[in-house]
């Protein structure tokens, strides 16, 4: 029993020490906190960046409001790409960032209607208003207006169309706009308002249809990005790359309007 | 003054949770039986000696060492006492073979010698060939032997046995009695056996200690306790049925006798000058000291305390017949004794018949009368 | 298939087991062999993670470990990084929310050992450690196996607490459960489905192993003696 035990003990110790030594992935790839509407567009830009410069980044997608909170609590992100500049400016005021950041795009929202839905593709949302009032809508998805800018924009557009009160009891709120898209395009909802960039992403719509909602129905989605105090060389390089023509072309393809520069 | 071969002495006192007022001693090579009904605290006392139970107050010395002295703050736990303990259900380690069970107690033996010594011990307890078996594949008697071997493997200063025969059948039990009797001849340590069976205690032990509700009442040889119980309570506890009350009539210094008056009969008992003439005393006599007078021939003891009475009960119990003889009608004067059945038949013993017996005076034992009610209440 | 996330989950689960189970053995044995006035409260405390919603647990962990808490600040001063959003923070959270899964099966197993066996071990001269190692643990091995397997499987599947305390940092705190959630949001149903299947298989295997060994153990004891 003794020699067996000793060998077993040694094996356990080796395994344990291997485990304790830190996390798995390369520690130098910087962390980027990106709003969920950037999901497919940013993946493309990051791939391009890797091909051209050899530098890689780790992107985490989520709602801007959530990231703002996490960064304030010390989350190790080096670059924050928000869908609403208010969050960036707040962090800048708290001294968490190198500067006040820079506008990288203006976002748009779109109405999506899956196959077989009773709703029509009306960008003014009047059809939605009457359908909701008539009780023809069971579930309608938007992102959570509390911390997702695209959710806030959706709420503003619905209010402008006079549909908010009628549609409100039917709302399904996504954690972020990507989850809202998930709900909207599932068979369980009649439709939703999501980011245009997601509607344009390959493989997302499936058999559904979309229409862009006019900009004047909501406050502009001024998407601002900023480097945090932790930003290293690669993060800074990426930050610069995002303002180059190659990256901007990708953003345009995904329906973003570019800041005039 | 103190030698390693010194015996065991224990004194324990507490009120809660189990009341104890016990004092006992056991010399090296002696077997002391702790006897008492269930709940009398015998297991608790044994466990206190082992160190697996800590009493509130007490002192235990064994083999020249002080194991417990609450006054001085000495409370050695079981693993620091060199005890061998045989549990009622043996407490064998179920996942280890018999040999490995025994080896567990051999921490003080050099590792190279352990297997051989364990085997030798198992041979000694008649388990040769079974050392590789686990307890589940051993019979009750075999398990008990492993438990004894394991207890002895510790080279203990004291061997403690807690009702070790209660879990086996009669036939196995008698075999085990014999084995224990043989084994202990070579042991130079005090051995304490807890049992509720008087016959077991009488058979195996050198001395018997009677317990009642945590108090040690009397310690003496088995015969001594049965013939000279210290009180009617002890007499009842050791199964003496013949307990009566009488008055001291007089003392005869010359013949070393004391006379007592029992319902019109004067009996001669052993000299007991501590009882003043006229005091009421309790007296007992073991069944073995009541001799039946043969109808046809006068017996040798006829002169000794002859008593005449009527048979009120006559129960055939195989080879022996139990008889109850009422000496005075209407009073609690039933004498219990047994005779071989053939004798009962030849003398025509039957309920309603009269008979005569002799009470051997060296069996008549005087005790202080029980406070309050009559001594003969059960 | 996010290999990094799977590896991370496995690391987290193994590390939790390696740290929690030995500590659990000590605690469970103490609880099984001692009676004291505060015992029901202590046992309830250890059982809390069973009934608390993971978000409540996550909330309190954030408050206790976060960048604003004294503990979090002390840790950051000591090591240079925060406790939340790191793998180490996850390990700590994982140990806490797995307490009942490690302690309860072990405690039941220790309670099932007849007290006289411990007394016999003491009379054999065995120290408390020797008794634990040679006598009690071998007899409590089904409880040990349950504790290991349940802690492992439960850690693999934990989501709410991991998300709140760890964020979703790839290579650091993005476990398989979180990766699946993320994949679904990214409309990658195949990827999500593959990882879910792997987790399902691992969990089923873990539970089946526990039940099979304990029933085999029971059957063997029913047949014996």
Image (tube, rainbow, N blue to C red):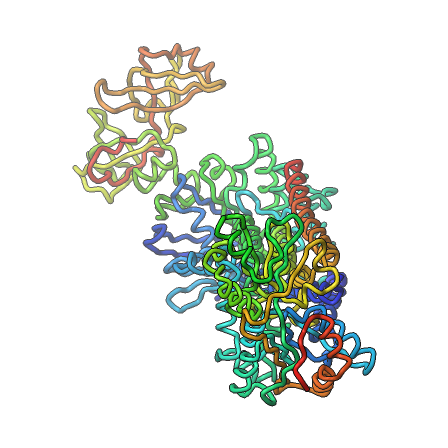
Q: Position of residue A233 (x, y in %)?
A: 72, 88
Q: Position of residue B290 (x, y in %)?
A: 37, 26
Task: Count the labels in the image.
Answer: 0
Q: Residue at x 63, y 55 (%)?
A: A113
Q: Classify the position of the N terminus of chain C by image quarter.
A: bottom right
Q: Position of residue C33 (x, y in %)?
A: 50, 56
Residue C179 position by quadrant: bottom right
In the depicted view, which residue is nearer to us: C210 or B366?
Answer: C210
Picture layout, residue C17 above or below residue A133: below
Relative side of B237 to A91, left or right: left
Relative side of A161 to B314, left or right: right
In the depicted view, which residue is nearer to us: C122 or A160?
Answer: A160
Q: Residue at x 59, y 30 (%)?
A: B171
Relative side of A19 to C114, left or right: right
Q: Position of residue A254 (x, y in %)?
A: 71, 70
Answer yes or no: is residue B297 visible: yes
Q: Classify the position of the C terminus of chain C by image quarter.
A: top right
The residue sitting at the left extreme is B278
Answer yes or no: is residue B108 visible: no
In the depicted view, which residue is nearer to us: B76 or B309?
Answer: B76
In the depicted view, which residue is nearer to us: B318 or C123?
Answer: C123
Q: Residue at x 61, y 54 (%)?
A: A120
């Amino acid at each position: 029993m003794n020699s067996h035990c000793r060998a077993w003990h040694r094996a356990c110790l080796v395994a344990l020490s291997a485990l304790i030594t830190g996390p798995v992935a390369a520690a130098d790839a910087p962390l980027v906190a990106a709003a969920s509407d950037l999901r497919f567009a940013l993946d493309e830009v990051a791939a391009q960046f890797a091909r051209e410069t050899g530098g890689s980044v780790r992107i985490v997608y989520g709602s801007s409001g959530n990231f703002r909170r996490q960064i304030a609590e010390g989350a190790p992100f080096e670059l924050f790409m928000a869908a609403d500049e208010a969050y960036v400016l707040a962090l800048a005021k708290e001294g968490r960032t190198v500067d006040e950041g820079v506008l990288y795009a203006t976002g748009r929202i779109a109405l999506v209607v899956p196959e077989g839905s009773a709703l029509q593709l009306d960008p003014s949302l009047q059809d939605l208003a009457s359908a909701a009032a008539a009780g023809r809508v069971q579930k309608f998805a938007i992102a959570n207006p509390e911390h997702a800018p695209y959710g806030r924009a959706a709420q503003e557009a619905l209010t402008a169309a006079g549909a908010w009160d009628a549609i409100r009891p039917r709302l399904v709120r996504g954690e972020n706009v990507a989850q809202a898209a998930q709900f909207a395009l599932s068979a369980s909802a009649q439709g939703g308002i999501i980011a245009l960039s997601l509607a344009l992403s390959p493989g997302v719509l499936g058999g559904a249809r979309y229409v862009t909602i006019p900009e004047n129905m909501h406050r502009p989605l001024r998407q601002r990005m900023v480097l945090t105090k932790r930003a290293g060389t690669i993060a800074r390089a990426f930050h610069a790359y995002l303002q180059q023509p190659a990256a901007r072309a990708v953003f345009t393809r995904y329906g973003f309007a570019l800041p005039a520069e | 003054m103190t030698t390693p071969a010194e015996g065991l002495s224990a004194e324990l006192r507490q009120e809660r949770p189990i009341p104890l007022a016990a004092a006992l001693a056991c010399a090296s090579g002696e077997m002391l039986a702790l006897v008492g009904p269930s709940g009398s605290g015998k297991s608790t006392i044994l466990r206190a000696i082992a160190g697996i139970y800590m009493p509130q107050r007490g002192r235990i010395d064994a083999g020249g060492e002080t194991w417990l002295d609450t006054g001085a703050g000495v409370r050695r736990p079981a693993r620091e006492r060199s005890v061998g303990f045989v549990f009622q259900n043996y407490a064998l380690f179920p996942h280890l073979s018999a040999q490995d069970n025994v080896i567990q107690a051999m921490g003080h033996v050099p590792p190279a010698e352990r297997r051989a010594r364990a085997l030798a011990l198992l041979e000694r307890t008649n388990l040769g060939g079974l050392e590789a078996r686990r307890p589940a594949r051993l019979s009750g008697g075999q398990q008990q032997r492993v438990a004894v071997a394991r207890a002895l493997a510790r080279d203990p200063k004291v061997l403690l046995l807690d009702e070790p025969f209660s879990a086996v059948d009669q036939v196995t039990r008698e075999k085990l009695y014999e084995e224990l009797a043989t084994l202990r001849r070579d042991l130079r340590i005090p051995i304490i056996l807890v049992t509720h069976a008087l016959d077991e205690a009488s058979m195996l032990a050198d001395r018997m200690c009677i317990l009642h509700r945590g108090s040690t009442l009397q310690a003496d040889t088995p015969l001594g306790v049965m013939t000279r119980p210290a009180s009617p309570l002890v007499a009842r506890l050791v199964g003496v049925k013949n307990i009566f009350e009488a008055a001291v009539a007089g003392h005869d210094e010359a013949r070393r006798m004391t006379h007592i008056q029992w319902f019109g009969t004067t009996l001669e008992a052993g000299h007991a000058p501590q009882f003043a003439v006229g005091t009421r005393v309790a007296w007992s006599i073991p069944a073995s000291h009541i001799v039946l007078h043969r109808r046809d021939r006068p017996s040798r003891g006829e002169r000794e305390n002859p008593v005449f009475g009527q048979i009120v009960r006559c129960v055939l119990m195989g080879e022996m017949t139990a008889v109850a003889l009422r000496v005075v009608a209407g009073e609690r004067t039933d004498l219990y004794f047994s005779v071989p059945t053939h004798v009962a038949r030849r003398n025509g013993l039957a309920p309603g018949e009269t008979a005569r017996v002799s009470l051997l005076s060296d069996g008549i034992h005087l005790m202080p009368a029980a406070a309050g009610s009559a001594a003969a209440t059960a | 298939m996010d290999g990094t996330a799977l590896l991370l989950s496995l690391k987290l689960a193994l590390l939790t087991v390696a740290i929690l189970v030995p500590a659990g053995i000590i605690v469970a044995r103490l609880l099984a062999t001692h009676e004291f006035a505060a015992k029901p409260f202590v046992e309830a405390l250890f059982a809390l993670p069973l009934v608390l919603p993971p978000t409540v647990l996550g909330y309190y962990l954030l408050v206790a470990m976060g960048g604003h808490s004294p503990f979090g600040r002390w840790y950051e001063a000591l090591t240079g990084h925060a406790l939340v959003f790191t793998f180490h923070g996850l390990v700590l959270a994982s140990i806490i929310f797995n307490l009942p899964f490690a302690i309860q099966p072990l405690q039941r197993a220790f309670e099932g050992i007849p007290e006289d066996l411990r007394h016999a071990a003491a009379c054999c001269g065995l120290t408390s450690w020797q008794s634990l190692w040679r006598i009690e643990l071998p007899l409590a091995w089904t409880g040990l196996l349950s504790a290991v397997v349940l802690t492992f499987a439960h850690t693999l599947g934990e989501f709410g607490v991991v998300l709140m305390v760890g964020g979703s940092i790839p290579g650091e705190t993005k476990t398989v459960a979180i990766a699946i959630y993320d994949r679904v949001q990214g409309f990658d149903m195949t990827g999500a489905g593959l990882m879910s299947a792997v987790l399902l298989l691992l969990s089923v295997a873990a539970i089946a192993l526990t039940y099979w060994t304990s029933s085999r153990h029971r059957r063997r004891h029913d047949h014996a003696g």
